[in-house]
Amino acid sequence: MSLIARQPGAAHAPADDAFVTEQLRPFLTDLLAREQAAWEEQGAPWQDPPELLLAYLADGKALRPRFCYWGHAIAGEGTGPLLVRAAAALELLHAFALIHDDLMDGSDTRRGRPALHREISRRHRAHGWAGDPDGYGRAMALLIGDLAFALASRLAATLSPAALSAWHRMIDELVTGQFLDLAGAARQDRSTEVARTTTLLKSGRYTVTGPLRLGAALGGLPELPPGLARYGDLVGEAFQLSDDLLGVFGDPRRTGKPVGEDLASGKPTQLLACAADLLPPAGQALLALTGTPGFSRADIAELTGELISCGARDHVERKARRNVEAACAIVDDAALPPRVAAALRALAMAATHRHR
Amino acid sequence: MSLIARQPGAAHAPADDAFVTEQLRPFLTDLLAREQAAWEEQGAPWQDPPELLLAYLADGKALRPRFCYWGHAIAGEGTGPLLVRAAAALELLHAFALIHDDLMDGSDTRRGRPALHREISRRHRAHGWAGDPDGYGRAMALLIGDLAFALASRLAATLSPAALSAWHRMIDELVTGQFLDLAGAARQDRSTEVARTTTLLKSGRYTVTGPLRLGAALGGLPELPPGLARYGDLVGEAFQLSDDLLGVFGDPRRTGKPVGEDLASGKPTQLLACAADLLPPAGQALLALTGTPGFSRADIAELTGELISCGARDHVERKARRNVEAACAIVDDAALPPRVAAALRALAMAATHRHR
């Protein structure tokens, strides 16, 4: 179901819904079925990875393909096979990013279900296979992430040079952002600068600006108009700020992941960078404990309260809302076809009205 | 230093040595320096992954680039920038494969030194960073493997369509082979069929036939002559059989990795498939214990002895030698330029005269 359709009051966006359900999903199903057949031809008596990857792909909101679709619509009419391939590459890339991210963070849940490595450990136990089930789950999930990336790269290599350049830039930004996420937590960096760069690269560029740029390049616009690149960075940042807030203050039954993991590991989020400015001494002492083994569930709960009372939560919420307003103003000023403008506004608003 | 130059008595192959030292290495150094600069421009205050990846790349034997070089020489004279890019893509792909393989197998050493994830854990401890050092080492190594794959894919995307098709085929075979390696161990599969397919895909195709095919495609031969594809599969299999033997009977001071890991995890090697045919009942009982927590160091030593006395070691050694003889006969029969034929014979012989 569409992200948009889930938001009460938000506009429906049937064009990208139709693109996702009628073109993207069948393309992915067919691609993975052919991959499985290729494995069989190679002599593999089992083909778990393409099977598991297909099931994994069925679950997403297809947010990046939607932005790619609308980036293409900025440049021209129609869709065409290259747009579907690009959208499929984005979904595969996102599966790769999520699967490896859960391994890197040691996260056991995703979208309200066991993370892929946990699900594979469970199967290992159920089959009574040899070796350590947890080690097997992690190894196999790592490999399925690699397969997703390999398939994404194979699709991307067939795109136009301008689109391919947008693709490589996006991946470079994703990897750099992911590194800053890990390295910032290890170094317990609380600078606004690192938090903003991490957010921009890991989420803004990767979730919104990159897919928009990719779609526009496929439509014949080698450069995204500067206003729309700004729109992408603003909406992407708002999306990540909302994600950071959900990770601390969200309802685990709706987000599908436990709260407090980001606090426990001391991720370099803008929420914590803001808290480093605003917290009173007792809160600062708690903040300094994040990322250490001594940081308990009770500390998470206490720091969560401090983040509210010092005003950090309000600050981040306001910033996300202001980003969305600024992004919508850019769309209003740009001379876009009305259906494109409406869709970009709706997607921007959805970024801060998230439950998961 | 060249693999060939290290083998006493084997012919020198100065052309591929010169290619590796004068073209490939400087290309990789420059690529990683530019990558590091790009990270800095993106606002990353630290750039550990490109730095660590460059150091990692300095260490290899560049075996796959050599086969690629000679595959290209089959098709024509000269080298050119595309051949260097393809060779660099192969080295990056191999770094990705080794780094992720060590994570999947939980191997703590590589080339006589700590595996990358162990080295990064050590740095984490030395810096006194926050969080679990081992978890950080695994997460960062995973990401550096992803970076290597991303850079390899970026280079490969610029190759000709025929070369790109050889590239994608090779990656598909690598991922399938790696899956069979993990899945075969978990299922404790002892069939010759699975062991042979795993060897062929994970090593034969990936180490020899794929790089040869890639080089030939770049040189203008869209299909590798069937004889040379057979040469590649034979030599690649011999290379893997020698690797399997070194993993059980090798000298850890020379191989740089502890012996017995493959036995402890019960990898689906041809050595164990052969043992399943030849071992007497006591040995079979030991073989059935591989991959279980009850399999001790003493069991490894005992099974190692049984593999010798039942004849499995001799069988595998003979098979590797026969492969090399058959591969050299193919080279003799093919109408190849003499310097190409000499290099392919020397590389084939080196495959079974390995110490590491």
Image (cartoon, coloured by chain):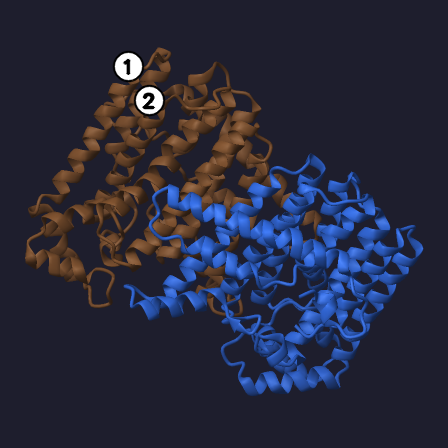
Chain colours: A brown, B blue
Amino acid residing under circle 1: Asp
Circle 2 packing at 10 Å, graded few (<14), some (14-19), many (20+), is some
- In the image, B6 versus B277, the foreground residue is B6
The location of residue A312, given as percent across then percent down, is 13, 44
Q: Dividing the image into 4 quarters, which one contains the C terminus of chain B?
A: bottom right
Q: Is residue A335 left or right of residue A119?
A: left
Q: Can you identify the residue that label 1 sits on?
A: A333
Chain of the residue under label 2? A
Circle 1 packing at 10 Å, graded few (<14), some (14-19), many (20+), is few
Q: Can you identify the residue that label 2 sits on?
A: A227
x 21%, y 60%: residue = A290
Q: Can residue A303 be seen in this view?
A: yes
x 76%, y 70%: residue = B352
- In the image, A334 versus B286, the foreground residue is A334
Amino acid residing under circle 2: Gly
- In the image, A86 versus A197, the foreground residue is A197
Q: Is residue B114 left or right of residue B74?
A: left
Question: Could you tell me how far apart the alpha carbons at marks 1 and 2 are, in whole angstroms?
Answer: 9 Å
- Which label sits on residue A135? none
Find residue B291 and report its image quarter: bottom right
Find residue B282 and report its image quarter: bottom right
Chain of the residue under label 1? A
x 71%, y 59%: residue = B17
The location of residue A113, given as percent across then percent down, is 36, 49
x 78%, y 63%: residue = B347
Sequence-earlier tag: 1 or 2: 2
**Mark 1 falls on what kind of element?**
helix
Q: Is residue A46 visible?
A: no
